[in-house]
Amino acid sequence: MNLRINSEYGTLRAVLMHRPGKEIDRLTPYNKEFLLFEDVPYLEALQHEHDVFSNLIKESTGAQVYQLRELLIRVLYDREILLKLMRESLKRSGLAHLAEDILERYSTAECAGILTAGLKIHELKKKIPNLNPGELMDYAFAIPPCPNLYFQRDPMALTPGGIIFSSMKMEGRQREADLLRTIFENHPDFKEHVNCLYPINGHDNPPSIEGGDVIILSHEAVAIGNSERTDEKAIYHAAKALLAEGSVKRVYEVHLPKKRNFMHLDTVFTVLDENLVLTYPDAMNSVLQTSLYTLKDLQGDRVNIRREILKESLLTVLEREIPHLEILATADGNPDYSMREQWFDGANVFAIGPRRVISYNRNIHTNRALRNMGVEVLEIPSSELSRGLGGPRCMTMPISRARV
Ligand SMILES: NC(=O)NCCC[C@H](N)C(=O)O
């Protein structure tokens, strides 16, 4: 499998998703903010909505849907890998010394569950009755959960030149990127095909970048959001690696307002075809500065890139990059409905092919506007999925698309 994609809309061939599990049941009214949720979802209904989504992808495209849990269990059969992840996950609670005890008492599948759904002290006490957890109370986390794992777009990004492994900004999501990187660098289906663009070798604490900020604009250009989650130093390094690799010629850094409802660039626009982009109009108007990275010179390992600050809106950049571009505003530009639907990721549809998208059913005004534009819109239920503040694009990591 060639782990590169050259568009946001080529017909989907394979995608990685995560069916939400027990990690969702760890959310409470008191930890939901730290864990980046707007509410406390109802797990069974959330799973049902997610199943509808993954089945629809299979039926409408025939694409292979990989499930993160299965891939993870496969790589965790390597004890060294499992031990490293377990130690790392126990560090914050000060219990890293228990990693080997845990591996002895739990099966590999159970360990995969622990690494995604977390582990509480009282649960651990059932396996290790004489446990001394120091100051930690029974209901404290020995390992915190990853409830955002169903937003598979964010822990990495596939680009035309290879993979950007995220370094996630928020503490509540950091393990997700470790899990994804471990899978892609070790699973037999993928490991030979990874060209890692980021983080650069030897960087222990890389500046943050998240997959939702990376969008392929055209055959020659990629945009990366400088956002609440992605740092300009990370963009510089990712741009350098992408330009040196040579598949793209321009990387745009797009400055987004650091606001929760614009948290990533893909909350603001989605490319649906060679000449069609769906956008949230308010954000397009407030994005006033972009920077452009291009290659200056390349001699062996020595790469120099140039950065120009463009005093241009994102709209101008898109119009220049994409010839004969048609822009469709969410809710057809109605300010009240587009604002409402932005809260439920109206602009964040998942393109499964040119002018074919999967969208939340609740975004009725956006869906109608899309259909009026000739886009095929397949809808999924969204009462629970949307409580995590992410849409269909956020929930999917396309790993193979037909080249366009
Ligand atoms: N690409 C995206 O916009 N992903 C949505 C992530 C939502 C998640 N609750 C978060 O705050 O990170």
Image: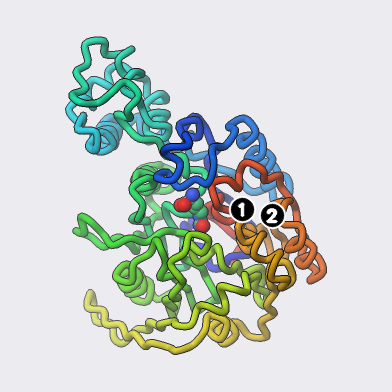
Question: Residue 23: percent from the left, percent from the top?
Answer: 46, 33
Considering the image in quadrants, where does the C terminus appear? bottom right
In the rendered view, does 331 fall on the left or right side of 133? right
In the rendered view, does 395 fall on the left or right side of 310? right
Indicate whether 196 appears above or below 42: below
Q: Earlier in the sequence, mark 1 or mark 2?
A: 2
Query: Residue 185, can we see it?
Result: no
Write the residue at 40% across / 23% down.
110
Query: Residue 45, can we see it?
Result: yes
Question: Residue 276: percent from the left, percent from the top?
Answer: 68, 74
Q: Quadrant of residue 249?
A: bottom left
Q: Nearer the viewer, residue 104 or 334?
A: 334
Write the residue at 59% across / 59% down.
401
In the rendered view, does 362 fall on the left or right side of 260? right
The amino acid beneath tag 2 is Ile
Q: Nearer the viewer, residue 175 or 251?
A: 175
Circle 2 residue: 358
User: How busy is the neighbourhood of tag 2: few (under 14 within 10 Å), some, or many (20 plus)?
Assistant: many
* Residues marked 1 and 2 touching at CB (< 8 Å): yes
> SS for tag 2?
strand
> SS for tag 1?
loop
The amino acid beneath tag 1 is Pro
Q: Nearer the viewer, residue 30 or 221?
A: 30
Which disc is residue 204 wearing? none
How many marks do you count on the picture?
A: 2
Write the residue at 63% across / 85% down.
323
Circle 1 residue: 392
Write the residue at 57% across / 45% down.
387
Question: Residue 20: percent from the left, percent from the top?
Answer: 54, 36
Residue behind label 1 places its C-beta within 8 angstroms of ligand 1: no
In the rendered view, does 185 fall on the left or right side of 92? right
